[in-house]
Amino acid sequence: MDTLGGMTVFLRLPVMLGLLGLSALAADMTPWGGWNIRDVSAKEYGARWPFTVDKGMLGCKDSAVVFRAIPRKGVHQEYAVNGIARGRRLAGAPQRDVFSIVQDAGAAKKSVAPIIEDGLKLCK
């Protein structure tokens, strides 16, 4: 048995496992592969920010706009923002009602129109 050959196998295994871990991490950092995404925050939008969470990621693909909430604590959750996204089951992602995280504005909810408009720009 070639010791050097055996060491090579043992050295490759941690590298391969590390790469698998990095790809899993990268998959967790984006809503879905191939989507155009960007970070968004309450600070950026000011009074127009509709969500109860302070930041997240906005994504668009084929005119479907999705918001991934980044809560202070807990699990990231994806929300279909526009009708196109709500009408599709996107990449197996659980669909949640975006209005469950939209702030109240009196008798109604705040508008998500600025988020939809900016999300659609990502598709261009």
Image (cartoon, rainbow, N blue to C red):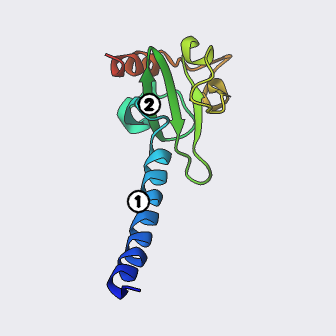
Count of all numbered marks drawn on residues in the image: 2
Give the quadrant of residue 92: top right
Q: Position of residue 6 (x, y in %)?
A: 40, 81
Give the quadrant of residue 102: top right
Q: Position of residue 57 (x, y in %)?
A: 44, 36
Q: Earlier in the sequence, mark 2 or mark 1?
A: 1
Determine which residue is flagged by label 2. Answer: 58
* Left or right, residue 74 beside residue 112: right
* Left or right, residue 92 beside residue 24: right
Which numbered circle lies on residue 19? 1
* Quadrant including the N terminus: bottom left
Three-letter amino acid code at the position of disc 1? Leu
Three-letter amino acid code at the position of disc 2? Leu
* Quadrant including the C terminus: top left
* SS of the residue under disc 1: helix
- The residue at 56%/47% (across/down) is 71
Which numbered circle lies on residue 1? none
